[in-house]
Image: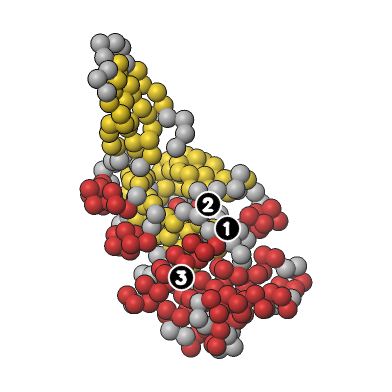
Amino acid sequence: MLKLKHVNKIYKDGTRAVSDVSVEIKQGEFIAVLGPSGAGKSTFLRCINRLVEATCGQIFLRGIEITSLSGRKLGGVRRQIGMIFQQFNLVKRLSVLHNVLCGRLGYISSWRSFFYSFPKTDVEWALECLERVGLREVAEKRVEVLSGGQQQRVAIARALAQRPKIILADEPIASVDPPTAKMIMDFLKEINREENITVVVNLHVVEWAKNYADRVIGLARGRIVFDGPPSFLDKHLESIYRGKETRIVEENMFFTSNRLRLTWKAEAGRIVSVRWQVEKEKGGEGTCLGE
Ligand SMILES: Nc1ncnc2c1ncn2[C@@H]1O[C@H](COP(=O)(O)OP(=O)(O)O)[C@@H](O)[C@H]1O
Ligand SMILES: [Mg+2]
């Protein structure tokens, strides 16, 4: 559902924050992007919804190239992308409900958005989203009186209100205490499982990635240095944190008999080639076409 092809971001001062990143993400995956501070995680995520413009490369969301869109078409794609930030990015003096309704701004006309006038169905939906994160009873309160954890749950409700196909969360648990962090990760996981919403979450703590993600993308100095299941992480943590590139390569036997030997080779948990060898004859190698 999301495809990045040779994406690079070089900031004006010459910092190369994202370096030749190509990756494909499927609908319904729960992905943790792991890497030390400065690895390029935030830039990577922001390039996806064009909060940051990639210097070059292409990004496709559900088959549409978003790197070249502007105006209304870009808005149409953006509303499919829910965004959650470390510092919540809510309007503190507005009510909780109003903040969640901001998730509907991409759907209403500009005069309505100017007056913050939302259709009744949107208000009902926003309240449902608040119910989902257990905050319906504080809908009328101003955001500034809520705790950090509650504010992050409001941000999740706002993202949900968009009815997104994908949620991008940039270090959503870095500013909350551990029990709240668990609650927030549980919500993201639940949304992912129940609604098949793709979740890409930036994290810098390995344990959270291991406990929640189906797949981990390791970034170091703007490059992907790991892409695979969390169970493979231990062996490769060094590459993520020291920036040494290692794609996971496994070799294994499929099948063997007296005459025929069949082995496979996998990178990042996917079979990429198979090799066969018939006794006393020349063997061969082929690229894997399917999964
Ligand atoms: N607006 C910016 N201008 C210049 N350099 C930036 C900017 N934002 C981030 N950087 C640099 O890009 C690199 C990656 O940053 P970032 O994407 O924030 O990484 P992370 O989220 O993994 O900490 C860092 O070296 C950072 O200093
Ligand atoms: Mg960051």
Q: Which residue lies furthest to the top in this view?
A: 281
- Circle 2 sits in a helix, a strand or a loop, which is it? loop
Q: Residue at x 77, y 72 (%)?
A: 111
- Which amino acid type is marked by label 1? Lys
Circle 1/circle 2 CB separation < 8 Å = yes
Q: How crowded is mark 2: few (under 14 residues within 10 Å), some or many (20 or more)?
A: some
Q: In which quarter of the image is the C terminus?
A: top left
Q: Which residue is drawn at 34% across and 38% down?
A: 267
Q: Position of residue 269 (x, y in %)?
A: 35, 42
Whether ligand 1 has any atom under 8 Å from the Cβ at mark 2 is answered as no
Residue in the foreground of this view, choosing between 168 and 251: 251
Q: In this view, does 157 lie above or below 62?
A: below
Q: Disc 3 versus disc 2: distance between alpha carbons?
A: 18 Å
- Which amino acid type is marked by label 2? Gln
- Which amino acid type is marked by label 3? Phe
- Disc 3 target residue: 187
Q: Position of residue 168 (x, y in %)?
A: 49, 60
- Disc 2 target residue: 27
- Disc 1 target residue: 165
Q: Is residue 68 left or right of residue 264?
A: right
